[in-house]
Each structure stands twice: as structure tokens, then as C-alpha cells.
Image (spheres, rainbow, N blue to C red):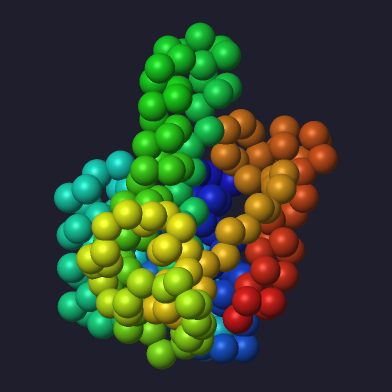
């Protein structure tokens, strides 16, 4: 499987659903994203969903901003944001191809900082979703974005009344191409990612 497999399986799970979705598939390399989208649509020709591709690099703030402006103008809202950009550079470090600092810096930039900045940027159009259910808390900050009250940002935002559901999914060891070869992952006991993500989407859809 090529590098696009990291987001390929989630798209396939959505295409299998009986619900019709507009799926925006983002990737640093637009050609790879297009290839993944075409392969997935070809595998599920009867799907009522449509997959469209956009170029985005979570390591580049300008790329995130440009993507947000495009999606906001074209669609007006996002019902679900799946942050699946990931970097696992440990094998490159242990094989002597990169320095330790590069391994740590790039991994955290992609997996943590990039994910946070992307989500923060997309909050205004996530709040426009018609699918969200409101929750309440006595220590909530006021609705709206950005949050204006200073102090206790991490805790208080976790109690926000904006009604955005956040799911943190630990997929476990799946047979993707992340970090090392997909076939090697299978031999080491990795699970089938298509079956796993299909179950996740079925429960959350």
C-alpha cells in the first residue's frame, strides 16, 4: 500500500455507509490524495457519497489557513473533522538517517502542534454543523469563538457548551504503512484497518 493508506481506510469506511457524505480528503501531496480517492470510489461504485480532494500540510500555517478559507467558502460548515496526519520517524532515527532532534521536533510538529492548530482554525465552521448535540456544564465559558475569558483554558474549554463532540480514538496496532512496511506490520500481528475503521464509523455515524 502506498503512503496514502493512512487516510484511505477512513474514506472507505464512510463510502460503505448507507448515509451519503461529502468527504473532503486532504493530503500534502494532491496527486496521492487523488489516487486514494479514485481507488476508494472505484471499490464502492454504488456509494451515495462523493469524495473530493484538497491540498493541506499541517506543518504549514499558510496551508491550513488557505484550506480553511476554501472549505468555509465552498461548503460553509464541517460536520466532522478527522485528524489523521501522522509521523512516526523513530525507524529513520534508529537506522541513522535523521538526528534525534529532527525525529522529536517533526513528530511533535505533525502529531501534536499541527493537529491542534488545524482543529483550532476549523472550529468556526465545525460550530456551523447541524449534527451537533448541545451539552451543559455549570463551569462552562460562554458560547462562541474565540473564547475570550483568560485562565484555565484547557480545563474550561473541555467543558464548553458549543456542542462539539470530540472523540479520541486509539486504533491500536493496525496494518498501515506508517513508520515501516505494511506487510511487516501484518507479520507482527497488526489488525486489518479497513475492518477497524468501519466499526468506528458505524458506531459514531
Could you say which quadrant of the image residue 163 lies in?
bottom left
Q: Nearer the viewer, residue 80 or 55?
A: 80
Q: Residue furthest top?
A: 96
Quadrant of the frame with the C terminus: bottom right
Q: Nearer the viewer, residue 163 or 169?
A: 163
Could you say which quadrant of the image residue 60 lies in?
top left
The residue drawn where x is 45% and y is 33% is 107
The residue drawn where x is 53% and y is 44% is 2
Q: Is residue 105 above or below residue 75?
A: above
Residue 11 appears anywhere in the view: yes
Q: Is residue 88 above or below residue 64?
A: above
Residue 16 appears anywhere in the view: no
**Left or right: residue 105 compared with residue 190:** left
Q: Is residue 102 above or below residue 155?
A: above
Q: Position of residue 26 (x, y in %)?
A: 37, 59
Q: Residue furthest front?
A: 138
Q: How many marks?
A: 0
The residue drawn where x is 72% and y is 61% is 196
Q: Position of residue 71 (x, y in %)?
A: 25, 72
Q: Position of residue 166 (x, y in %)?
A: 52, 67
Q: Position of residue 4 (x, y in %)?
A: 49, 50
Q: Nearer the viewer, residue 21 or 59?
A: 59
The residue drawn where x is 67% and y is 53% is 171
Amino acid at each position: 500500500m502506498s503512503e496514502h493508506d493512512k487516510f484511505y481506510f477512513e474514506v472507505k469506511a464512510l463510502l460503505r455507509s448507507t448515509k451519503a457524505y461529502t468527504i473532503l480528503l486532504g493530503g500534502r501531496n494532491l496527486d496521492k490524495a487523488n489516487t486514494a480517492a479514485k481507488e476508494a470510489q472505484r471499490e464502492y461504485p454504488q456509494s451515495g457519497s462523493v469524495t473530493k480532494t484538497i491540498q493541506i500540510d499541517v506543518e504549514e500555517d499558510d496551508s491550513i489557513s488557505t484550506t480553511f478559507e476554501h472549505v468555509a467558502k465552498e461548503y460553509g460548515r464541517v460536520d466532522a473533522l478527522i485528524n489523521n496526519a501522522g509521523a512516526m520517524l523513530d525507524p529513520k532515527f534508529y537506522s541513522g538517517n535523521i538526528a534525534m532532534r529532527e525525529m522529536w521536533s517533526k513528530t511533535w510538529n505533525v502529531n501534536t502542534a499541527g493537529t491542534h492548530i488545524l482543529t483550532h482554525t476549523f472550529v468556526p465552521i465545525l460550530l456551523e454543523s447541524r449534527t451537533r448535540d448541545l451539552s451543559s456544564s455549570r463551569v462552562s465559558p460562554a458560547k462562541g469563538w474565540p473564547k475570550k475569558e483568560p485562565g484555565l483554558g484547557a480545563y474550561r474549554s473541555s467543558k464548553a457548551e458549543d456542542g462539539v463532540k470530540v472523540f479520541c480514538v486509539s486504533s491500536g496496532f493496525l496494518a498501515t504503512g506508517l513508520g515501516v512496511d505494511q506487510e511487516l506490520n501484518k507479520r507482527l500481528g497488526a489488525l486489518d484497518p479497513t475492518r477497524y475503521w468501519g466499526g468506528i464509523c458505524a458506531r459514531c455515524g
